[in-house]
Image (spheres, grey):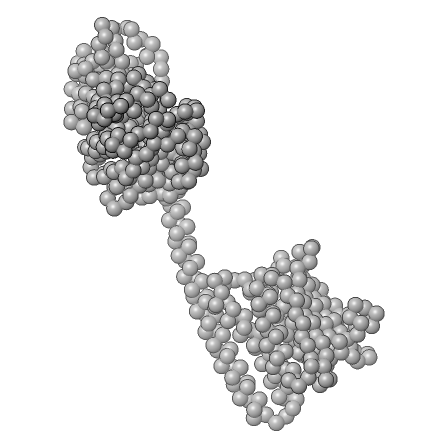
Amino acid sequence: MIAFKPDMMDALTELVGLGIGRAADVLNSMLDSHIGLSVPSVRLVQGAELVEVLSRDGGNALSAVQMRYSGSMKGSVELIFTAGEAGKLVDCIMGEEIVQTEEGLDALRSGTLCEVGNIVINAIMGTLSNVLKLHLSYTVPSYIEGNARLLVDEAGIVEGHVVLLAETEFTVETKSIQGQIAIFFSPVSYELLHAAVREFADIPA
Amino acid sequence: MKNEYALFDHVPLGIIVCSRDQTVRFWNSCMEDWTGIPRQEIAGKSLPSFFPRLNEARYRKRLDLLLEGGPPIIFSYQLNGCLLPHRDPHRLERVQHITATSFLGKDQERLALLAVEDRSEVSARIRSARLELIKRIQTEETLRKTIAEKEFLMRELNHRVKNNLSMILSMISLQQETVESESFRSTLEDLDGRIRSFSLLHEMLYKSPDTTNIRLDIYIGNIVREMFESLRNPDSGAVLETEIETIELPFQSALYLGLIASEALTNAMKYALNDRGGGFISISVRALSDGMIELRVRDDGPGFNPGIDPMSGDSLGMKLIRLLATELKGELAFNTDDNSTTKSGVELIVRFSTGI
């Protein structure tokens, strides 16, 4: 895979940060309580490594909101939590008592996570596509749960796929919830992203 | 109303098609049922004029983005409540999950399609299950606290009982110093041993995190070693050998077995060693393959006097051993035959099931 130079990586991190900022604005206008959103780190990993990375963070029971995109680029985006963190986020947002369970979310709570994921993914992908002048269309968000392998398989990942992995921290009142945003790029889409970011950051080839 | 969307009248979802200015282009039969608004009435009208909440900036912004060709959006019930309620406010509120997508209609006009799922039934079941779960978690928490308090009190109680027994042992010890009669002194010595078995058990219970079970290797091992050291003649070469497996037993069974072991040891020391220059006593406790526990106390002394039947002997020690073996619902036996594995001396065997 073509490497992102440090300047380009900075630019990509800034774009994800911008998107997260927009997501926080939308979430705060939707909810009465204040939600903080931050992205402590952004990195690019090979698709094959992702199962290992997610498994390390408790990948046997994961909850994710997924949207596929196509157009200028093709791939999918997932907002991923461990089952426990997903439940905690929904309960915090709803101001309900936190019920710790490793068994995933029921239909009502998964609908809430779907809306939160939808807002976050739309904001990040909207920012990326606006700034990088990409034309993308999306499928309807869906909720999936399972282990790391299932989530990666659901993203339709094949040899050569690259994943932009952004650690995401939600802060609701005093509670902090950790998640990951994974944007899957096909090899061709990754090259397009590389070129678009290079142009955006005004870095010569 | 255009009939190009008539197929949507046959799906189990509420379907609304709107133009960019949120004018209703299609309203399917599900939406008629769920809102009480006939399509003739709403068609061609602004959707927010019937459902004013959609005029709020938070919804307008997201719908505007969608109608500019943005990604699909979701309005979940938990975050938004019922956005498209029945016009009769007395009707039951429906749990709606709305997914909005945009598409290009005739003449490349950008339109929004709102698919409304009714999750009322599943939601009611989830809510009651969730309430039940919360109740169970709270009950478990209360039980955990109660158990912790009970364990604390049990430890405290065992500590106090142990202290009281230590005081009784001190009094017996003082009494022994003033007694001249050898037989009374010996009686006090036996009594001391028995009380010591109780005292050690309560000490273990208050020191251990488990207030109900006792480890036999520690409990019986300590009792017999302590008793052997206090009763033996320091100049003799008497030997005690113990082989006690790591077995946990409930408080009561452990106490009974410990008392039997200490009575049998006292007897062996009195009658088998009996001031001989040396002698050998072995004590073993093991778990048998059939789930039984077996205690063996063996000595190399002269054995029972002729004519003495240990199963009916009337000494207090033997009476106690028989009584405690019965309490354990166990079998009691003695090997005294010279041809047996004991070669000489006496071997006491108690077997009982852990199921008591």
Residue A204 vs residue B120, the one in the foreground: A204
Position of residue B31 relative to residue A143, above or below, is above
Residue at left offset 39%, top offset 52%: B141
- Name the side, left or right, on which A147 lies relative to B312: left
Residue A34 horizontal/vertical position (percent): 21, 39
Which quadrant of the figure contains the C terminus of chain A? Answer: top left
Residue at left offset 38%, top offset 38%: A82
Q: Is residue B354 visible?
A: yes
- Name the side, left or right, on which A146 lies relative to A179: right
Q: Residue furthest front?
A: A204
Residue B54 horizontal/vertical position (percent): 19, 24
- Name the side, left or right, on which A177 lies relative to B300: left
Residue at left offset 16%, top offset 15%: B21
Position of residue B44 relative to residue B307, above or below, is above
Which quadrant of the figure contains the N terminus of chain A? Answer: top left
Snapshot quadrant of residue A48: top left
Residue A204 vs residue A16, the one in the foreground: A204
Snapshot quadrant of residue B273: bottom right
- Name the side, left or right, on which A66 lies relative to B220: left
Q: Is residue A115 visible?
A: no
Residue A142 vs residue A181, the one in the foreground: A181
Residue at left offset 41%, top offset 61%: B149
Residue B233 horizontal/vertical position (percent): 66, 85
Residue B13 horizontal/vertical position (percent): 33, 19
Number of marks in the image?
A: 0
Residue B152 vs residue B35, the one in the foreground: B152
